[in-house]
Image: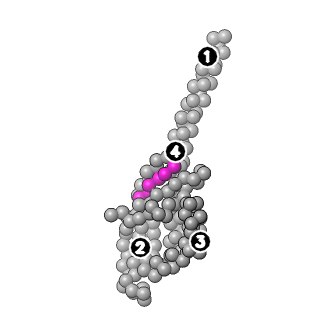
Amino acid sequence: MVLKFICAAFFSLIIFSGCSIKDTVKKGSDEEILRDRVMAFWRYKIDEKFDKSYEYEDPFYRKKFTMVKYIGSFHTAGSKLKWLDASIENIRLEGDTADVNMKLKVKIFSSPSQENAVEQEVPLRETWVNVDGQWYHVAKKAGLVN
């Protein structure tokens, strides 16, 4: 009888230990998954594959804005700004929301002929949300850091 109790206690300890380890590993992998998604999103934008970056926008945004409207917004702004590179400075996860601080390298054109372009690095703060196990960019929360 005592042996059964010890075995049950031992297995309970293993199960509860496994759960806490699993939660720790999951949090670490959430950040890795998010980091991969953020960089894929920005690679598509840098490569001007806006049909691909659109899929990374949150589902609520995609219900309001069609892909055609989304792509069209970049062609209007695209004549004055070109994304060259993106890097993640840090990520702060809080449940199903994440703040991502980034550095973007951009080329800014001062004229329609695209002469006199200036390259510079700008900080960017974005919000990402986890919806049904997948991380998405929140377009309305993105903005330059002051």
| x then y, percent, for residue 130 | 54, 52
Is the C-beta separation of discs 4 and 1 under 8 Å?
Answer: no
- Count neighbours of disc 1 (C-alpha within 10 A) and say few if under 14, some if 14 to 19, many if 20 or more: few
Find the distance from the CA under tag 4 to the CA under tag 3: 32 Å
How far apart marks 4 and 1 lie (CA) works out to: 32 Å
The numbered disc on residue 47 is: none
Q: Position of residue 3 (x, y in %)?
A: 64, 13
Most distant residue in the front direction: 64
Which residue lies most toward the bottom here? 113
Q: Amino acid at mark 3?
A: Met
From the image, tell me which residue sits under label 3: 67
* Along the line of sight, the residue nearer the viewer: 138 or 2: 138
Image: 110 above or below 39:
below
Mark 4, mark 1: which one is toward the viewer? 4
**In the depicted structure, whether residue 139 falls above or below residue 115:** above
Q: Residue drawn at (55%, 72%), measured in percent from left and top? A: 70
Classify the position of the N terminus by image quarter.
top right
Quadrant assignment, res 126: bottom left
Residue marked by disc 2: 106
The structure residue drawn at horizontal position 44% and vertical position 63%, both measured from the top left corner, is 142
Which amino acid type corresponds to the residue marked 4 in the rendered image?
Lys
Q: With 51 as the anchor, is 75 left or right in this view?
A: left
Is residue 9 visible to us here? yes
- Numbered disc in front, either 4 or 3: 3
The mark nearer the N terminus, 4 or 1, is 1
Residue 129's spot in the image, x, y percent? 52, 54
